[in-house]
Amino acid sequence: MRRFLPLFLLFTLCIPAFPAAAQGASLLDLTLRDLASPGRISLAQYQGQPAVMVFFEPECPWCFRQVRVLNRLLAQCPGQFQPLAVGTNGSRRALMAEYRRLRPDFPAFQISSALLDRVGTIPATPFTLLIDRHGAPAGWLRGFMPQEKLTPVLAAYLGVTCGS
């Protein structure tokens, strides 16, 4: 029982209730501007599997680290979840420069007012939303989450199981 106490504390401290503005709304029925190309991309194509949406901003070293963790998890858990990066708090030019620095192995977008309305205030970056296979919010994480701590969270909230 004692060995599960740290895991229980991690879940209760890191994943409080999702912001009220997004409860019941699909986060994957929006269209966002792609940071890798000039077009807009519908997030509906990512429904059907769990998604992890990490918000980043320019000049954020912890965001860089979080993207690296997600890149590793994506390689270890192919096809089990879809990471998505969303740039905030910067001009398009600054977000594109940060995208090139981050080099995510997954899609990256610029935040829209519609997404911000559903999510609410982003208190700090990195800020990570856990999204179930139907696009509904399953929880959120504030700040950097190392792989050893993120892996059990993904398993508990999204059913993602990764090999080592």
Image (spheres, rainbow, N blue to C red):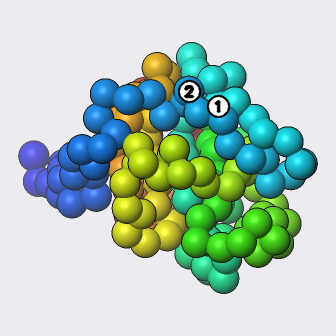
Q: Please identify the residue farthest to the right as the structure is shown.
A: 37
Task: Find residue 95 and name its label.
Answer: none
Residue at (46% x, 61% y) in the render? 127
Task: Place residue 47 in its image quadrant.
Answer: top right
Determine which residue is flagged by label 1: 43
Q: Is residue 78 above or below residue 37?
A: above
Kind of element beneath mark 2: loop
Local crowd size for mark 1, using a 10 Å CA cut-off: few (<14), some (14–19), many (≥20) = some
Left or right, 158 with reference to 10: right
Give the residue at mark 2. 29
Q: Is residue 19 left or right of residue 51?
A: left
Vertical relation: 31 (above or below) 20: above
- Amino acid type indicated by mark 2: Asp
Mark 2, Cα crowd under 10 Å, few <14 / some 14-19 / many 20+, is some
Coordinates of residue 61 in the picture (x, y in percent): 62, 80
- Is 139 left, or right, of 44 in this rendering? left
Name the amino acid type tagged 1. Leu
Position of residue 138 measured from the top left corner of the image (x, y, whole percent) = 35, 35
Q: As drawn, which residue projects farthest toward the front?
A: 113
Q: Which residue is found at the position 51% from the left and 66% from the top?
A: 126
- Name the one closer to the observer, 92 or 75: 92
